[in-house]
Amino acid sequence: MAGVAVSTTINGDAVEYLCQPDETLLEVLRDRLGLTGAKEGCGTGDCGACSVIVDGRLVCSCLVLGAEAEGRKVETIEGMAHGDQLHPLQQKFLEHAALQCGVCTPGFLIAAKDLLEKNPSPTEEEIRFGLAGNLCRCTGYDKIVRAVQDAANVMKGA
Amino acid sequence: MRYIRPLSIEDAVGELAKAVGPAAILAGGSDLLVRMKGGFIEPELIVDIKRIGGLADIKETADGFRIGAAVPCAVLGENKAVRKAWPGVVEAANLIGSKQVQGRCTITGNLCNASPAADSVPALVAAGAKAVVAGPSGKRTIAVETVPTGPGRTSLAKGEIIEAILLDKRPEHAGDAYLRFIPRTEMDIAVVSAGVNLTLDDHGAIKTARVALGAAAPTVLLVEEAGQVLVGSKLDEATLERLAKICSGACRPIDDKRGTIEFRRKVAGVLAQRAAAIAYKRAGGK
């Protein structure tokens, strides 16, 4: 198979890579670019652990081909903190202990960021529906929902 | 395997038409990539249609709406004009998958994936939506219900691509609705579903009606008799009972882990009644 040359932007940086035509964006991020924050849970778009934002849209990177990223803007969990300054969602996930094993956490954080950007004051129900594409087998979700609510309050005040 | 990203529909059709091995069209990929990963399909050519001019746009035309084949359902759901004119179609499209899947999946893909349980398809059939098909011998416009011919199979010939879905402009006093049964609140596949589209006369009586059922047969069912029974009525009790009976009778469902034949038959009738009531209210009926 001939490789596909891709020029894209990841977390604000211009990035170029060569990938196979059937390689997913998740595989490119993890195996070619060393951005291992996005996780492979199911590989079929059901669990959300590989969530990233492409051109302002929340997507599962396991259901995007690496070749499709040409000319797009990709945001991953690695771009969420500013240096040592955690994003309010990251801070609140820590404070509320909204994670245990942590495999789903990058996906939840990216999905929650997308949710709060589109709806800065979500109700609990809106948070639960908004994050329904992210599965967590540890927390039972309550702590995640509380952390997102708390982060929303902090972000509104900021 | 080759991945190409044509900029014109003619190039895309040309590549598909001359493809030697299995070829696949990629829009949102939420079905295609899962099938590739599962080994159910090994395309030698993937034609990504998202950069083709116009395919990622929703256009309001003199006749209604033209929804490009690469428009994600999330974008469709954010379009106020479509939502106002065709709330049933939009709510059906927005039921597909999670936020992540919504950012990628398309109604054209939902139609061409040809799952009997596709959520947007009964709503589109009830709406009388048309598909614009581009192919080696030119373009044709066909009713959406003629696209799926069985689970995973369509009537599209080699080299053909659906480039857009057309929805009519709405007259006064019109409404549509879509309901599905799932055993949870979301993120599930329809056990059975119903789409209803109505127009009313000035006195609130139903003038035209289309009723479609999903997950009730190998393909979406347009139940013409169910539409006919509604015409002239104001959705009185007796009419609703006849509607349910006709819909239950029209079903040719399967028994599987998600529902029995008996259950699907019964619920198809109930959902048709409820969807009709919502559509009637949306059309301004009282």
Image (cartoon, coloured by chain):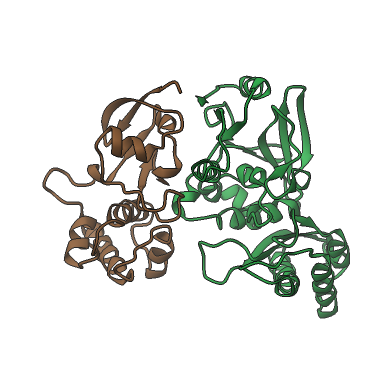
Chain colours: A brown, B green
* Above-or-below relation of B171 to B232: above
Residue A153 in sight = yes
Please tell me how many numbered marks the rendered image carries: 0
Residue A58 in sight = no
Residue at the spot 39% in from the left edge and 31% down from the top edge: A72
Query: Given the current orientation, which residue lies at the most extreme left position?
Result: A84
Query: Given the current orientation, which residue lies at the most extreme bottom position?
Result: B237
Front in this rendered view, residue A123 or A128: A128
Q: Quadrant for the C terminus of chain B, please.
A: bottom right
Residue at the spot 82% in from the left edge and 62% down from the top edge: B202
* Above-or-below relation of A72 to A1: below
Residue at the spot 38% in from the left edge and 58% down from the top edge: A134
Residue B201's x, y, as percent?
83, 61
User: Within the image, what quadrant is residue A53 found in?
Assistant: top left
Front in this rendered view, residue A60 or B201: A60
Relative to residue A53, is residue B199 drawn left or right? right
Query: Given the current orientation, which residue lies at the most extreme front position?
Result: B39
Residue B237's x, y, as percent?
81, 80
Relative to residue B39, is residue B163 drawn left or right? right
User: Within the image, what quadrant is residue B271 found in?
Assistant: bottom right
Residue B11's x, y, as percent?
62, 19
Front in this rendered view, residue B181 or B44: B44
Residue B278's x, y, as percent?
68, 68
Relative to residue A36, is residue A7 drawn left or right? right
